[in-house]
Amino acid sequence: MRKDEVVLKILCVKGLSALISDAEKRWVIMGIHICTSAPSIMHLIFADDCFLFFRACEQEVTLMKDILTTYEAASRQAINLQKSEMYCSRNTSTVCRNRIATNLGVK
């Protein structure tokens, strides 16, 4: 990858991060907390991998999907749903898991 491609990719990922952070500031997406006094974690980005954390509810799933669609349109970097995976807490019902997976188009 050329240097200018790396810079462009970093700028695009910063845009994705800004979209997610804005949703958190508006209290429409909640991240996870590793303990009560810790700040929330909304996303972690490593090279070509991105981990997104949000509640297993229809509102947050729809909003995260909208954020990813906006990111794809702006960056022209498509999310590979064939390689994407979803994990839920053990407290999430099977019905809810299936509904989220279907909505996001992941396994």
Image (cartoon, grey):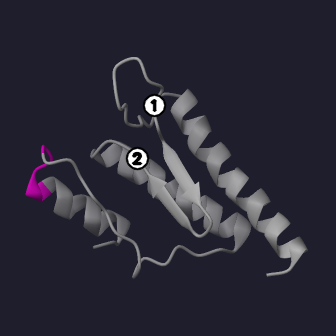
Marks 1 and 2 in Cβ contact (< 8 Å): yes
Q: Residue furthest top?
A: 37
The mark that comes first in sequence, 1 or 2, is 1
Q: Nearer the viewer, residue 88 or 2?
A: 2
> Can you give x and y, in whole percent of width and height, for residue 38 in the image?
44, 23
Q: Nearer the viewer, residue 37 or 91?
A: 37
Secondary element type, mark 1: loop
- Is 36 displayed left or right of 13 in the figure? left
Secondary element type, mark 2: loop
Disc 2 residue type (three-letter)? Phe
Residue 50 vertical position relative to residue 89 in the rendered view, above or below: below
Structural crowding at the residue carrying mark 1, measured as other residues with C-alpha within 10 Å and reported as few (<14), some (14–19) or many (≥20): some
Q: Residue at x 13, y 48 (%)?
A: 90
**Mark 2 lies on residue:** 53
Residue 83 vertical position relative to residue 20 in the rendered view, above or below: below
> Can you give x and y, in whole percent of width and height, for residue 26 in the image?
54, 28
Task: Verify whether residue 73 appears in magenta.
Answer: no
Q: Residue furthest right?
A: 4
* Quadrant housing residue 46: bottom right
Q: Residue at x 71, y 51 (%)?
A: 14
> Can you give x and y, in whole percent of width and height, for residue 1 in the image?
79, 81
Structural crowding at the residue carrying mark 2, measured as other residues with C-alpha within 10 Å and reported as few (<14), some (14–19) or many (≥20): many
Q: Residue furthest left?
A: 94
**Mark 1 lies on residue:** 40
Residue 54 vertical position relative to residue 26 in the rendered view, above or below: below
Residue 106 vertical position relative to residue 36 in the rendered view, above or below: below
Q: Residue at x 83, y 74 (%)?
A: 5
* Quadrant housing residue 31: top left
* Residue stretch in magenta: 91-95
Q: Quadrant of the C terminus?
A: bottom left
Disc 1 residue type (three-letter)? Ser
